[in-house]
Image (cartoon, grey):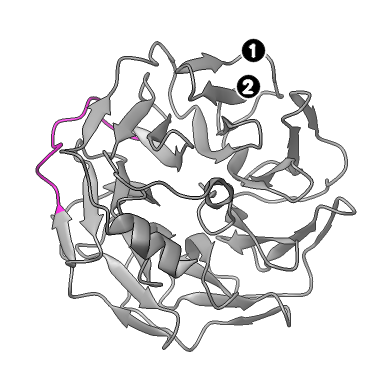
Amino acid sequence: MQPILQEQAAKGVSGTETIDTTSIAGLTGSTKWNSGTLASNNKIYGLPWDANNVLIIDSSSNTIDTTSITVTAGSQKWVAGVLAPNGKIYGIPFSSTYVLIIDPTTNTVNTTSITGLTGTSKWTEGVLAPNGKIYGIPQNSTSVIIIDPDTNTADTTSITVSANTSKWDGGLLASNGKIYGIPQNSTSVIIIDPDTNTADTTSITVSAGTNKWLGGVLAFDGKIYGMPRNSTNVLIIDPSTNVVDTTSMTVLAGSDKWNHGIIAPNGKIYGMPMSTGILLIIDPSTNMVDTTTFASLPGTTYRWAGGVLAPNGKIYGIPSSNWEVLIIDPKSNGTWPSDLYFSPYFNKY
């Protein structure tokens, strides 16, 4: 996989990135959706946070559908979606008591198969492991949730963690087959081994702090890049050595800056603006960050919550409190094989 990413990134760009905040607009309300997932029909499904519907984005026509799939009212319901091998999307419960299962072939939902998940702020993202199971990253929960799409069951006892709150926010699959959880308030990275159903919270430590990073991205160099929320630096994790670097890339001070990131075929990572109007652009090939090219995006707080790379090569930012979808054209000369767009390494958040 890494050679393919490197080959396409080396093809460079055809020009400076462009952004579009007018083609898909008029989505009123605050803290509506949180994250999106690319389905096999090439449409993007935004998970309901406070919204009472699933956001469906058709990147081929830049149109949306907010009426086909409705859900019950509530706040902070689901935090992320994961595409399973069965083609369904599994919504990870944040404060909801059940997993939301979306069937993109029928645009219907299953809310009764995986239930009884009490508590608030439980898990913050899900990752599909090579064993076919989905692993949810604990925020306040004392366990990793393991969802088996083959049986529509969940295991919340095999992997336990501390009772601390706001531990990790986001996770991703590394090329070594392990899942790395990004520290929010925790002083360590959680490393989940799906082969043994164990968690390591001692190998990689970081400094203390609150709301440090929010989500991570696997780059073409095999390293993981954590998006700065309140931190003034990008978190760089090398899974081959379990070593971290928090000095190479510094960013401006502030709180709630970026909410997850997405890698494009040009090799650059794009951090979604949260309470900043700045699009964060990370170039892993140079260890440089760009916070000036797009520094006055619309909105005030909780603008977009994650984004998705579509097969047309554009990135679609999921609107939280903003009324428009953020469409980024990275101007990549390279393209990925079609299966990579749906890969669990990248088709997350």
| Amino acid at the residue labelled 1 | Thr
In the rendered image, which quarter is residue 129 located in? bottom right
Binning the other alpha carbons within 10 Å of mark 1 as few (below 14), some (14 to 19) or many (20 upward) gives few
Q: Which residue is at 58% across, 23% downward? A: 56
Q: Which secondary structure, mark 1?
A: loop
Q: Nearer the viewer, residue 228 or 36?
A: 36
Report whether 2 appears left or right of 85: left
Q: Nearer the viewer, residue 20 or 125?
A: 20
Q: Which residue is at 77% across, 65% downward? A: 156
Q: Which secondary structure, mark 2?
A: loop
Q: Nearer the viewer, residue 185 or 144?
A: 144
Where does residue 78 sit, x and y in percent of width and height?
62, 40
Instruction: Please state the extent of the stretch shown in magenta in the rendering.
Output: 290-302
Q: Which residue is at 26% across, 47% downward? A: 257
User: Which of marks 2 and 1 precedes in the sequence?
Assistant: 2
| Amino acid at the residue labelled 2 | Asn
Q: Which mark is residue 32?
A: none
Q: Which residue is at 41% across, 72% downward? A: 222
- The prevailing secondary structure element of the residues shown in magenta is loop
**Above or below for 322 versus 4:** above
Is residue 166 among the parts visible in the rendering?
A: no
Report whether 343 appears left or right of 227: right
Where does residue 300 sit, x and y in percent of width and height?
25, 29
Where does residue 70 sit, x and y in percent of width and height?
69, 19
Question: For mark 2, what is the residue?
Answer: 53
- Residue 295 located within the stretch drawn in magenta: yes
Question: For mark 1, what is the residue?
Answer: 67
The total of numbered circles placed on residues is 2
- Considering every residue shown, the one lying at the far left of the view is 292
